[in-house]
Amino acid sequence: MKNYFKNKSVGFYLVLANIVLAVVLAIVFFATYKGDNGNGQLNMANNAYSSVPEVIGIFMIVGAVIDIAVLVLPEYLPIHYAALVCYGVSLIKIIFTIPDVIVGKINGIAYEGGNFELNLFWLILAMAIIGMGVAVCFIGLLKDKDEEEKMLKEKPGLPKIIKASSCATLVVAALVAGIVSTNVIKAEAAKGQQGGEEQPEEDHTLDPYKEKLEAYDFDPTSCVFSEEDNPYHESTSSEIQSAVGSNLNTRTKDGVELHKVYTFEGSTAEGWQGDYSLKKGYLTLWEDGLYNGTSNGNNIYGYWFNRDAFGEECLTLIATDGNNMVCNKLAGSSSYYEWSVDMKASYNGGRLIKVNGLKYYPLVDMYIDTAGETLEYEVGATIDMGKWAAMQVRGAIIGEGEEAKEVIKAGSIFDAEHEVSYTMPDMSTAGEKEIVANWNNQKLSATVKITVK
């Protein structure tokens, strides 16, 4: 062992440090990246979950394995370059995931979630690994450079090469299998969201509301524009503002009522110089290719398109004031909100309000999701409704005859103007009771039956 470390340069120990740090980073990453940052948000920014974040830890491990081979077979020092590539892939993935985390830290609004300190730890450690790895390329592994040059020229025969390449092949095969399987799972989930052949598992909690569906004379999925196809793409700002107006709920054109294609909604509450008021944002995309909205009370206008130059799905909003917005497709199996976008708000130095969008269908009903609680309480008990959610049901029957299709979906009620209010029962006596939720803005109510023992 003593002879093994004889004549080893600083580069040798840097490779050893790289292996240790890469394994530490991989272990810490896999142990923490799906954890909660304490604010109900994941440690990794939400925007990273559609792009296989596991690659960060996997490539660190692969790089460490390759560097172990460098220490065992120093005559094959050039394979250290492959380890550097793996470390580089991990670093690129980390850099991709943290901009929103940093911006959120600076602005004090963690729109995309993420633990700032933990993401910064991943970044610094990955950069240190890359820095040391690059240094090795110049320093080498041996103090005696003539001996090292001779060793690199006189490589051992084929058997060791076969063994080393076999190990590397197994590692790479495991890596590829992991990434492919992860992407297959994500693709299957995305099929249902994007109208693929396989739809998400049916939500049977909505069965009681299907009989309330009514015929609707517009299918929002049929409204498709490229920028060139949008009839307003060459219109002036004043022409667009005049055509769309400021009403987000109803519009007419040539005496005919226009349909909504998408509606976006969102809010944020940020303390700034004693102002803790709610900042709200809304958008309505209309079937004629225009949109209007409000951002913290200020009207915004523009036109939209949902196909790029290659015919691929996108959603882009071109604003008359120059604050254009490119929407992000939401990942996951949700069939309610489908897109999200940051709207510029004229407060606190130009902060952003994140709004989420859904295809517009008529409102059908509301119900209360009690999060699976057993609705039995003792006399005099206080009901904790912290996990309950008021849900709105939207949907319609699109088309006629055999081609008719039912659309029904549910999502939490977002209503910054009118909150859902609850009428609570008398808990001082036993019996079967009711909790009534009222959404007065839509003149809807829902009842939850409870037992008081």
Image (cartoon, rainbow, N blue to C red):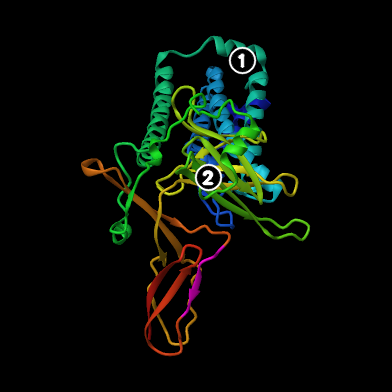
Amino acid type of disc 2? Thr
Amino acid type of disc 1? Glu
Q: Which mark is residue 218?
A: none
The residue lying toward the viewer, choosing from 263 and 372, is 263
Q: Dot 1: what SS?
A: helix
Q: Which mark is residue 284?
A: 2
Mark 1 neighbour class, 10 Å CA radius: few under 14, some 14 to 19, many 20 or more: some
Residue 45: % across, % down: 56, 44
> Quick check: 389 left or right of 302?
left
Toward the right, the furthest residue is 273
The residue lying toward the viewer, choosing from 230 and 3, is 230
Residue 11: % across, % down: 65, 25
The residue carrying mark 1 is 148
The residue lying toward the viewer, choosing from 23 and 317, is 317
Tell me if residue 17 can be seen.
Answer: no
The residue lying toward the viewer, choosing from 94 and 285, is 285
Q: Which residues are magenta?
A: 418-424
Position of residue 111 relative to residue 391, above or below, is: above
Q: Residue at x 59, y 57 (%)?
A: 39
Q: Dot 2: what SS?
A: strand
